[in-house]
Amino acid sequence: MFCLHTLPWYWKALILVYDVFKCWQQDASTAKSVRDVYESTIHVFVFQVLVSLVLVGPSLVLSVQDRKNTNAFVSEMVLLLSTYMLLIRGIGTGVVSAENACFCLQFCSCYFFFCHFICISTNRHLLLGKTIVQPCCVVAMCVFPVMFSHVPRDCMHLSPYVLLFLFSGEVSACACSVLSYVIVYAESIVDSVYVHFM
């Protein structure tokens, strides 16, 4: 599994420090509705998807040295993005508060691009353009938490669930790993049943 890493503590601390700094600087009179926060979160998420697509796109359409691992990596990253989309959908339906979802997405987006960075560092044949993709991942690890930080109005570091949110990237990766194993086992069962009856 490519997405079973732990985001270093200094990245988590940087996100928290930035949120505290933003909280001190913000104007309390700028109130946003839940619908505005939901739409802004979707825009940031779509931008994140586009950036990740640009980073992995050439490896999907051009030939790579290890196609099996490249496809597995891309499918795991798509699963991670799907879990983030479910969280964003939770804002729209009112299941999750916008502040908690955006705080969670700060760590998730940083973790997502950290996985890109670590996987490219350990397997240089995974994606094309390693010398361009790695610095772009580091920049994205900084940019997207900042963008998600400015979506809601409230100060997110004051949430009572802050320790849980620190590990939201890792939790989403574990959920994706379990789902990936379930899909593989279901596929092997269906395949063996098909072969048995044929």
Image: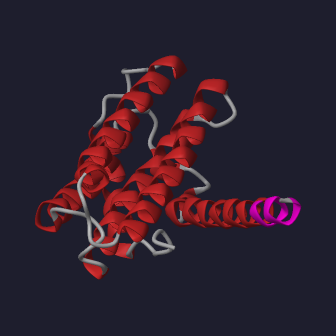
Q: Quadrant of the C terminus?
A: bottom right
Left or right placement of residue 72 versus residue 198 in this view: left
Q: Is residue 36 magenta?
A: no
From the viewer's side, name the closer residue of 164 and 127: 127
Q: Number of marks in the image?
A: 0
Q: Give me the residue at 11% from left, 67% from top.
A: 131
**Snapshot colouring:** secondary structure
In x, y percent, where is residue 43? Answer: 37, 28
In x, y percent, where is residue 89? Answer: 59, 32
Q: Give me the residue at 57% from left, 59% from top.
A: 172
From the viewer's side, name the closer residue of 23 and 1: 1
Residue extending furthest left?
A: 131
In x, y percent, where is residue 67? Answer: 36, 66
Segment colored magenta: 191-197
From the viewer's side, name the closer residue of 59 and 63: 63
In x, y percent, where is residue 42? Answer: 43, 29
Residue extending furthest right?
A: 197
Q: Main secondary structure of the magenta part?
A: helix
**Quadrant hosting residue 162:** bottom right
Left or right placement of residue 18 versus residue 188 in this view: left
Q: Give me the residue at 63% from left, 62% from top.
A: 180
